[in-house]
Image: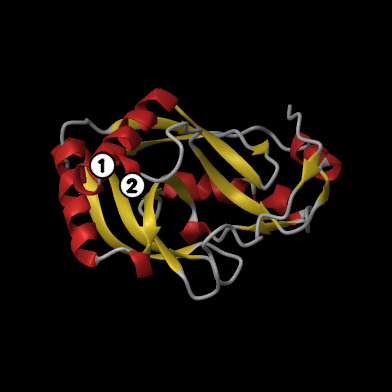
Amino acid sequence: MTDVTELRDHWYWRPGWRAGRSFYTWHITFADSPAVVDLGQQYAAALADLPEYDPIPLRWLHLTMQGIGFTDETERRTIDQIVEAARGRLAAIPPVDITIGPAQIDTEALKLPVQPVEALTGIRDAIRTAIADVRGEDNVTESPDYRPHVSIGYTNTTGPARRAVESLARHTPRTTQMTVEAVALIDLNRDHKMYQWTTVAEAQLGGHR
């Protein structure tokens, strides 16, 4: 059950963002995770009842980890150094088994919480430390607080959440499991009310190949 009563349009321009601009960030992506894609498909019926949500195309499902900075403000040499530092630190962390779901209503998204939080926080902290190794602690963006989730739809309007809450309540709660073996550094764009990216590099957990 959710305590969210109001929805907020997700697609406002956040500080620094504008059309044509993109951002370097670390995500866990799911192109090779059919179980996660299948979970998104199972929740598609709930989203079909809700025009206030923009469903996320299955190829763009992701778990946000840690940002670095806008691409026009970050030298590629710096990115390469961060990638190498992250690979070194993540090699000491074994692959992590996670559970995704069931869906919850959030202010700006229909999201799937991810557990265990502690294991994912450990991965994120290793990435944050790698960024600090290269750029210094004062240049690590974003809060250390972390609530891992996979969004399956973003809000496109502002208004009451009642219909979304009632629609989700009619659907059977669903979860899936997978093993996280790598984290992707991506070049992320949001020009078209959709998060799209190209993969810049990957860092494997536990030296996994």
Q: Residue at x 39, y 23 (%)?
A: 118
**Residue 116 in view here:** no
Along the line of sight, the residue nearer the viewer: 33 or 103: 103
The residue carrying mark 1 is 132
192 relative to 4 in the view: left or right = left
Q: Is residue 160 left or right of residue 38?
A: right
CA neighbours of label 1 inside 10 A, class few (<14), some (14 to 19), many (20+): some
Q: Position of residue 15 (x, y in %)?
A: 56, 58
Q: Residue at x 47, y 45 (%)?
A: 36
Question: What's the colour scheme?
Answer: secondary structure
Residue marked by disc 2 = 139
- Residue 203 percent across, percent down from the top left: 22, 48
Residue in the image at 53% along x and 64% along y: 17
Disc 2 on helix, strand or loop?
helix
* Quadrant of image for the N terminus: top right
Q: Amino acid at mark 1?
A: Ala
Q: Position of residue 78 (x, y in %)?
A: 21, 59
* Mark number displayed over residue 81: none
Count the labels in the image.
Answer: 2
Earlier-in-chain disc, 2 versus 1: 1
Q: Is residue 170 above or below residue 75?
A: above
Are the two marked residues, 2 and 1, in contact with CB atoms closer than 8 angstroms? yes
Drawn side of residue 127 relative to residue 101, left or right: left
Tell me which residue sits at (51%, 48%) in the image: 38
**In x, y percent, where is residue 67?**
39, 50
Q: Secondary structure at mark 1?
A: helix
**Spatial CA span between label 2 and label 1:** 7 Å
Q: Amino acid at mark 2?
A: Asn
